[in-house]
């Protein structure tokens, strides 16, 4: 019997992406993640990573990983609720809670797991979620998994969030107001003080996802709550250990009862194995460095200001960015991918991002400078960006 391939629709879809110029292959890093790396056999200036503070390659993090692997083994071999909670996991939970000045913290396998697992655990189909339209995919998936009613408000539109919550006043069900702290594709900062007021006024739970604010904003990188002085007024803070912290993981900070509840109901915590001990050890070393080497964060912001003003002087449109995430807007997804490929050929690694990651017509390349880039590297990157953009008519020549 001739069997037709039941997955043939996948290759048809892929063909259509190839025609649209949005099909992508995976770039291969052949060195550690550094300001200049070898990627697909080429030396390139790396503006594509989330290694904000250069911690992914810090000798103290590497040393801590090696030592923990020798002492505790390569893997934890169980989920945390069974036999996968090692003393080093609890040490990291406590360390982050102290750093963030909250009662308790629990680390998940990733920021994605932390967001999706938490939102899905605490809400039910009777409840309501009020969510910024540009919130991260892991928040959106958590909302969907919870089966709560989802109300999306226009990006950073506090009045709209207020109006939606107002309409829910007096109705049954719990309410959650949720936002990214720093938006991952645009680099702008949430209007957290105003959102917190709105949540308080309507008795809603306030939750912020600080994936791109952890290690970047606030004293020693404590995030947006610290940046805005909102301690005690945000019920749930999510952060990531995968970006500025340089390793892997996500965490949830809040009250002791929130964390105890998650121990019992957050599905990634219950059903997926805990981090290898080396991961927890490297993260602990990273928090030491956040507290002992604050100049890394200062360098990050100095480089950010320097790079942004050079881009502006060259005539690039960088959207609404207020953080080291600096998009360079080009419009169509096809152009973004072509620009990214041409930059790569000239020695700059910056990813093209189009629909569905960002809305149609708002394609861009996304750049992120780090504390570890030198001024020479940034100058050279701007020179290449400008030259390639002129050639492609992204900038007037
Ligand atoms: C990257 C990101 C996450 C996911 O974090 P991981 O640790 O990489 O899973 C969650 N939220 C936002 C806003 C992010 O940018």
Image (cartoon, grey):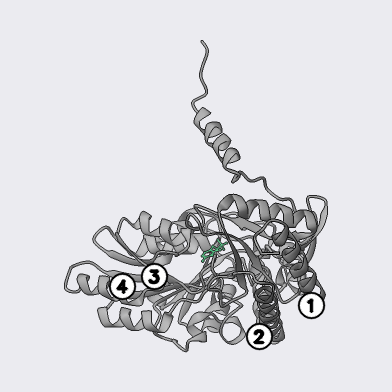
Q: Residues within 10 Å of mark 2 (few under 14, many from 20)?
A: few
Could you tell me if the residues under marks 4 and 3 are in contact, i.e. CB atoms within 8 Å? no
Q: Earlier in the sequence, mark 1 or mark 3?
A: 3
Place of residue 347 in the rendered image (x, y in percent of width and height, measured from the top left): 79, 59
**Element on which disc 1 rests:** helix
Q: CA distance from mark 3 to mark 2?
A: 28 Å
Quick one: 19 or 178, which is closer to the camera?
A: 19
Instruction: Tell me the element at label 3.
Output: strand
**Residue located beneath label 2 in the image:** 291
- The residue where tag 4 is placed is 160
Which is more N-terminal, label 4 or label 2?
4
Q: Which image quadrant for residue 261?
A: bottom left
Q: Residue at x 20, y 74 (%)?
A: 169
**Residue at which label 3 appears:** 178
Residue denoted by label 1:
375
Mark 4 or mark 3: name the one nearer the start of the chain: 4
Does dot 4 land on a helix, a strand or a loop? helix
């Amino acid at each position: 019997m001739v069997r037709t391939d039941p997955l043939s629709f996948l290759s048809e879809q892929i063909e259509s992406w190839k025609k649209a110029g949005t099909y992508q292959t995976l770039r291969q890093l052949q060195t550690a993640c550094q300001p200049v790396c070898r990627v697909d056999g080429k030396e390139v200036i790396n503006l594509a990573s989330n290694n904000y503070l250069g911690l992914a390659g810090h000798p103290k993090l590497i040393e801590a990983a090696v030592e923990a692997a020798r002492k505790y083994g390569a893997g934890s071999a169980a989920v945390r609720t069974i036999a996968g909670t090692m003393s080093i996991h609890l040490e990291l939970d406590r360390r982050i809670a102290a750093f963030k000045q909250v009662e308790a913290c629990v680390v998940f396998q990733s920021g994605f797991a932390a967001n999706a697992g938490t939102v899905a655990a605490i809400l039910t189909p009777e409840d309501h979620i009020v969510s910024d339209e540009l919130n991260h995919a892991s928040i959106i998936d958590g909302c969907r998994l919870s089966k709560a009613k989802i109300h999306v408000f226009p990006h950073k539109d506090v009045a709209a969030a207020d109006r939606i919550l107002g309409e829910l006043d007096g109705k049954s069900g719990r309410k959650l107001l949720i936002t990214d702290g720093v938006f991952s594709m645009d680099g702008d900062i949430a209007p957290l003080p105003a959102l917190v007021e709105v949540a308080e006024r309507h008795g809603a739970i306030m939750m912020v996802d600080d994936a791109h604010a952890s290690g970047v904003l606030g004293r020693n990188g404590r995030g947006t709550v610290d940046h805005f002085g909102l301690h005690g007024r945000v019920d749930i803070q999510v952060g990531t250990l995968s970006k500025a912290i340089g390793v892997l993981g996500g965490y949830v900070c809040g009250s002791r009862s929130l964390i105890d509840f998650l121990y019992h109901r957050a599905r990634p915590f219950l059903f997926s194995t805990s981090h290898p001990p080396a991961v927890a050890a490297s993260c602990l070393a990273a928090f030491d460095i956040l507290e002992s080497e604050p100049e890394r964060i200062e360098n990050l912001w100095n480089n950010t200001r320097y790079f942004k003003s050079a881009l502006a002087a060259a005539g690039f449109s960088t959207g609404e960015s207020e953080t080291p995430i600096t998009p360079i807007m080009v419009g169509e997804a096809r152009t973004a991918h072509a620009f990214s490929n041409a930059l790569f050929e000239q020695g700059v690694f910056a990813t093209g991002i189009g629909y569905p990651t960002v809305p149609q017509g708002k394609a861009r390349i996304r750049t992120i400078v780090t504390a570890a880039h030198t001024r020479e590297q940034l100058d050279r990157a701007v020179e290449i960006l400008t030259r390639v953009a002129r050639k492609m008519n992204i900038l007037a020549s």
